[in-house]
Image (cartoon, rainbow, N blue to C red):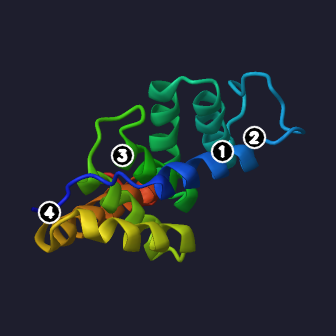
């Protein structure tokens, strides 16, 4: 029987290590509500994750991921794998991690290799196809202002 969800300590520890690093002392402890850049969107997600508000963390992480940020895509993939703030889904985790990996983000590539044993080959390939459609959606959002309206 094929395992369908990772039970290993490695992904949990990886997200905890990243969260510890990003929220080291020196970061502000106030709510980041007024920031507007791509980095601040990611910071908002990490702020809510640190303050044990996984649904809000997932909301902001999705915004970061949909803006094309490879770190946001990586973290959102981990959220799906763990079921943190979103329904647990290795399939969706693989899709978001594939997007991040395609931009050269090494931790995403390593996470994909770890997840490979928890998902059937067909589902893995389907998740990569889903990642391709997400890629198209992201780029349509990013470049919509360049496309003239139809007459």
Q: Is residue 105 visible?
A: no
Mark 2, residue position:
23
Mark 1, residue position:
19
Q: Earlier in the sequence, mark 3 or mark 2?
A: 2
Q: Is residue 134 above or below residue 102?
A: above
Q: Give how far apart the Cα atoms at labels 1 and 2 are.
A: 6 Å
Mark 1 and mark 3 in contact (Cβ < 8 Å)?
Answer: no
Q: Earlier in the sequence, mark 2 or mark 4?
A: 4
Q: Residue at x 67, y 40 (%)?
A: 43
Q: Residue at x 55, y 68 (%)?
A: 107
Image location (x, y in percent) of residue 39 = 68, 48
Residue 86 sits in quarter: top left
Mark 4, residue position:
2
Q: Residue at x 44, y 42 (%)?
A: 62
Q: Residue at x 48, y 28 (%)?
A: 54
Image-based side of 48 in relation to 34, left or right: left
Q: Earlier in the sequence, mark 1 or mark 4?
A: 4
What is the crowding at mark 1: few (fewer than 14 residues within 10 Å), some, or many (at least 20)?
some
Q: Earlier in the sequence, mark 3 or mark 1?
A: 1
Q: Give how far apart the Cα atoms at labels 2 and 4 are.
A: 36 Å
Q: Give how far apart the Cα atoms at labels 3 and 1 are.
A: 16 Å
Image location (x, y in percent) of residue 89 = 26, 47
Q: Is residue 9 above or below residue 108?
A: above
Image location (x, y in percent) of residue 143 = 45, 59
Residue 137 sits in quarter: bottom left
Residue situated in front as seen by the camera: 13 or 49: 13
Mark 3, residue position:
80
Say the numbered circle drawn on residue 104.
Answer: none
- Select label 2 or label 4 by which is in front: 4
């Amino acid at each position: 029987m094929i395992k369908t969800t990772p039970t290993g300590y490695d992904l949990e520890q990886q997200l905890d290590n990243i969260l510890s690093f990003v929220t080291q002392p020196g970061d502000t402890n106030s709510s980041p509500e007024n920031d507007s850049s791509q980095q601040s969107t990611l910071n908002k997600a990490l702020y809510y994750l640190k303050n044990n508000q996984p649904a809000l963390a997932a909301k902001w992480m999705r915004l970061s991921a949909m803006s094309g940020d490879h770190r946001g895509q990586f973290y959102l993939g981990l959220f799906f794998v763990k079921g943190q703030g979103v329904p647990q889904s290795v399939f969706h985790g693989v899709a978001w991690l594939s997007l991040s990996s395609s931009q050269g983000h090494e931790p995403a590539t390593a996470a994909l290799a770890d997840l490979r044993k928890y998902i059937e080959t067909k589902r893995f390939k389907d998740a990569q196809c889903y990642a391709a459609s997400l890629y198209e959606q992201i780029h349509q959002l990013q470049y919509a202002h360049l496309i003239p309206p139809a007459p």
